[in-house]
């Protein structure tokens, strides 16, 4: 049941945190400017993500080159990776359900879902922490990605 909640939880953020929701841009779920949320996310990242994605969000070496098992190494979550190319709702779904569940089509990944282990707040927090580390220009581009995603969903 938590998996469903995690995906539905994207709208939950606005319901559970109305004060934060009023300052949100279209399509925005992450709260990278909320110090408490970022601090929570830093702890979650260290405990759950750093082993694969690196303590400095640097990812694994040669992350764009497939391993002998056909899977890709863990990508960086800093500005050199592709995390910021995806809207908040997709990042949350991948984190909650795992890459394979979202990509489908037989895609194989070592990135399993964390929706069974982490609360909705923790999922949002870890992604908020990641976004809080990006340079301003990358944050601005990511906000535009979210706005385009929101417009696409409204059509």
Image (cartoon, rainbow, N blue to C red):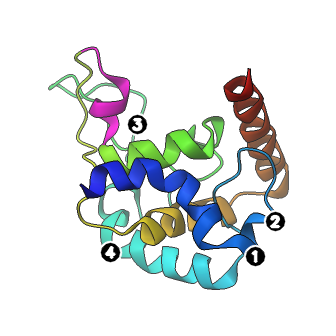
- Mark 3 or mark 1: name the one nearer the start of the chain: 1
- Left or right: 132, with 124 as reference point: right
Residue 43 point in image, percent of width and height: 43, 80
CA neighbours of label 2 inside 10 A, class few (<14), some (14 to 19), many (20+): few
Residue identified by numbered label 3: 63
Element on which disc 1 rests = helix
Image depth: mark 1 or mark 4 in front:
1
Q: Magenta part of the protein: which range?
A: 98-105
Tell whether label 2 touches label 1 (CB within 8 Å): yes
Q: Is residue 36 above or below residue 88?
A: below
In the rendered image, the quadrant that contains the N terminus is bottom left
Q: Quadrant of residue 66?
A: top left
Residue at the image position 31 percent from the left and 55 percent from the top:
52
**SS at badge 4:** helix
Q: Would you place residue 25 above or below residue 102 in this image? A: below
Q: Earlier in the sequence, mark 4 or mark 2?
A: 2
Location of mark 2 (residue): 22
Q: Is residue 13 magenta?
A: no
Residue matched to label 4: 47
Q: CA–CA distance between discs 3 and 1?
A: 38 Å
Q: Is residue 82 above or below residue 32?
A: above
| Pointer 1 residue | 19
Of the two numbered discs 3 and 1 in the rendering, the one whose residue sits closer to the viewer: 1
């Amino acid at each position: 049941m938590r998996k469903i909640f995690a995906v539905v939880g994207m709208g939950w953020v606005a319901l559970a945190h109305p004060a934060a929701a009023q300052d949100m841009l279209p399509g925005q779920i992450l709260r990278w400017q909320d110090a408490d949320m970022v601090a929570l996310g830093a702890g979650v990242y260290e405990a759950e993500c750093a082993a694969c994605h690196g303590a400095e969000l640097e990812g694994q070496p040669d992350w764009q080159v497939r391993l002998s098992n056909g899977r890709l190494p863990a990508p960086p979550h800093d500005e050199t990776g592709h995390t910021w190319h995806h809207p908040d709702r997709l990042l949350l779904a991948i984190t909650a359900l795992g890459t394979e569940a979202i990509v489908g089509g037989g895609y194989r990944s070592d990135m399993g879902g964390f929706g069974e282990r982490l609360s909705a707040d923790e999922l949002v927090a870890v992604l908020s922490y990641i976004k809080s580390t990006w340079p301003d220009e990358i944050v601005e581009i990511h906000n535009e990605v979210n706005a385009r995603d929101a417009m696409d969903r409204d059509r």
